[in-house]
Amino acid sequence: MTPETVQTIALIVIGLGGLGLLIGLVWVGLRENKGDPLQNRLAEFVEREMPKSLEEVELSMGFKERVLLPLFKGLADRLSRLTPESQIEATRRKIELAGQTHKMDPRTFFGTRIMLTILLGLGGAFVAFSTLRLDTLSGIGLAAFLAFLGYYLPESQLNSKIKKRQENIVKALPDALDLLTICVEAGLGFDQAMGKVYDKWDNDLAQAFGRVIQEIAYGKLRREALRDMAASMDVPDVTSFTAAIIQADQLGVSIGKILRIQADQMRVKRRQRAQEKAHQAPVKMMIPMVFLIFPSIWLVLLGPSLIIILQGGH
């Protein structure tokens, strides 16, 4: 190996060593500037999860949440200002009975009805006069009919939700009373028994019990919370049940006995309602039988005879 080669190899080794030393010093300096790794990780998580400004918060939302929903709610609120306050309160009461308080605002709902009425009315008029080319009376009739549908359908849907919720509460009440009775007779308090019902089931009645428990925890009297629960349902069985519990609480009567009596009564009422529906079934079956089944039978039985009579007549 020549001296020039040895000198070249030595220079390469020295250069690589110096480069490695420089990289090590830079890496150590960066490690020293980073601080606590856990704190750095938490800071990165906060920076990634938390937007830095209100603009970033708005931009992180979709177009529907940023533009369409606020515009729709603004128009609905402006239109609802033209309606009497009594109608707004009546709508609020229906929304409460439907259990949609956390999902629906009464002014927005009423404004939606007005907007649907206007849009369907104008759309019906446009279709009637420009597309179908109907006469004036027929076009006005079609537009008025569609406007009526726009005003009536949201109210009908809300009434349907109210009826369905009340039916679900009536069906769930006897079983809930049985569970309440078992829990109270096992040594639990009435509030803890309602908590067991709330934990076990996921229906409208259990959610109402959970709301009562939360209101009591916030400092509301039990009788006031129960009265508000009965008022938010408007179910006679629930009203009688809460009245019996409030009266037992005020008079010092054993709640376990009251619950046992109420559970027996609710089971009897459930059996009576089932029997009533069973007796109504033949009457309800008459309409489809008369208008759908009987004509088909008459057509099958008398059709060939009529064909023979008509052919013989010729």
Image: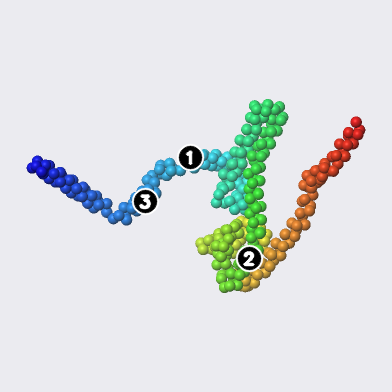
**Above or below 272: residue 99:** above
x, y percent for residue 242: 63, 64
Residue at 68 percent across and 67 percent down: it is 264
Task: Tell me the distance, in whole angstroms, between the alpha carbons under discs 1 and 2.
Answer: 47 Å
Instruction: Tell me: 164 left or right of 64.
Output: right
Q: Is residue 106 left or right of residue 8?
A: right
Q: CA distance from mark 3 to mark 1?
A: 26 Å
Q: Tell us which disc is closer to us: 3 or 2.
A: 3
Using a 10 Å C-alpha cutoff, classify the residue at mark 3 as few (fewer than 14 neighbours), some (14 to 19) or many (20 or more).
few
| Kind of residue indicated by mark 2 | Leu
Q: Residue at x 79, y 49 (%)?
A: 286
Mark 1 or 2, nearer chain start: 1
Residue 69 lies, in percent from the top left, at 52, 41
Along the line of sight, the residue nearer the viewer: 40 or 304: 304
Q: What residue is disc 3 on?
A: 45
Extreme residue toward the right, this view: 313
Q: Which residue is mark 1?
A: 63
Which residue type carries mark 3? Phe
Residue at which label 2 appears: 177
Residue 262 x %, y %:
67, 67
